[in-house]
Image (tube, grey):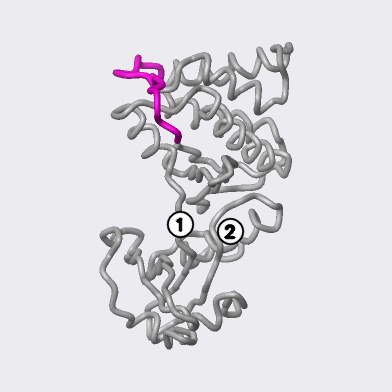
């Protein structure tokens, strides 16, 4: 596969002498997360501050891996770097108009017996994962219900767009959904960790899997908020026979898997909190 360099980022990488694979591989940067050693190799992530040609700086995540492979339909026997699958998924989401990470650079190299890959994505400046946001709300109090539900509506829109295109995230947890509240009050959403995403023939299979995952990891939301999200996702005001069947299917799966334990705390509003 040919190397990929974003045209928007090419001059920034060139300004930092980082357009070459070897230079990126040798670039000294602290680990943002400790390297993951499995699948016969390793994979690690670093956060890097890059200088802008006109002054100032910006941040990217530099992901490097060696012999960290998975079997793909295009590489069924020897496998291929897991970053290849992640990069392809990023391009798929963006081609379908689904907000996600912006790819900056991707390339693979074979060095002796080792297979290396580099994937760079832009940092989601100002975005906070819904997992971290909810934990903050539990400690300090949440914004008014109207603001929370505008955020839920934005997430529902993104999820519906994924499923219209038959895309199943496959591990859609709050830590993979990022939101940003802009100065004008609008909400932006991004979804990350796309490696396990897949395109399925049956849209309903995507819907059940992703709604189950998101619902089961969102027990700190009240049942009324989760039902409101469900109706917003389906774009209905009252439950239809299909909606009732879908809700029962999602919740019964949670019961079977023991994911319906009462939360120790629920989100509550606090005066003065705006996001």
Q: Disc number at residue 125?
A: 1
Range of magenta residues: 258-275
Majority secondary structure in the magenta region: loop
Residue 116 placement (x, y as % from top left): 41, 75
Q: Disc number at residue 173?
A: none
Q: Residues within 10 Å of mark 1 (few under 14, many from 20)?
A: few
Residue, disc 2: 90
Locate the C terminus by quadrant: top left
Of 71 and 247, the residue lying toward us: 247
Q: Is residue 249 found left or right of 268 in the rendered image?
A: right
Q: Residues within 10 Å of mark 2 (few under 14, many from 20)?
A: many
Residue 177 placement (x, y as % from top left): 49, 42
Name the mark nearer the viewer: 2 or 1: 1
Confirm whether residue 76 shows in the render: no
Of 271 and 166, the residue lying toward us: 271
Above or below, 35 relative to 206: below
């Amino acid at each position: 596969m040919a190397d990929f360099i974003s045209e928007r980022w090419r001059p920034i990488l060139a300004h930092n002498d980082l357009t070459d694979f070897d230079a990126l591989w040798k670039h000294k940067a602290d680990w943002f997360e400790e390297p993951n050693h499995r699948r016969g190799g390793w994979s690690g992530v670093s956060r890097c501050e890059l200088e802008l040609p006109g002054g100032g700086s910006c941040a990217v995540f530099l992901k490097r891996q060696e012999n960290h492979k998975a079997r793909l339909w295009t590489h069924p026997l020897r496998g291929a770097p897991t970053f290849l699958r992640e990069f392809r998924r990023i391009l798929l989401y963006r081609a379908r108009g689904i907000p996600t990470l912006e790819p900056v650079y991707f390339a693979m190299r074979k060095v002796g017996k080792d297979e290396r890959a580099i994937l760079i994505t832009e940092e989601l400046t100002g975005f906070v994962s819904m997992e971290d946001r909810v934990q903050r709300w539990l400690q300090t109090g949440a914004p008014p219900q109207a603001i929370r539900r505008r955020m839920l509506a934005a997430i529902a829109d993104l999820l519906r767009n994924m499923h219209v295109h038959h895309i199943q995230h496959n591990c859609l947890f709050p830590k993979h959904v990022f939101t940003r509240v802009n100065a004008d009050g609008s909400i932006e959403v991004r979804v990350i960790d796309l490696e396990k995403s897949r395109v399925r023939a049956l849209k309903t299979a995507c819907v059940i899997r992703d709604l189950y995952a998101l619902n089961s990891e969102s027990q700190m939301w009240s049942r009324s908020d989760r039902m409101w999200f469900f109706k917003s996702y389906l774009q209905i005001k009252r439950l239809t026979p299909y909606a009732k069947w879908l809700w029962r299917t999602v919740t019964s799966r949670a019961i079977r898997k023991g994911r319906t334990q009462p939360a120790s705390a629920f989100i509550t509003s606090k005066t003065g909190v705006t996001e």
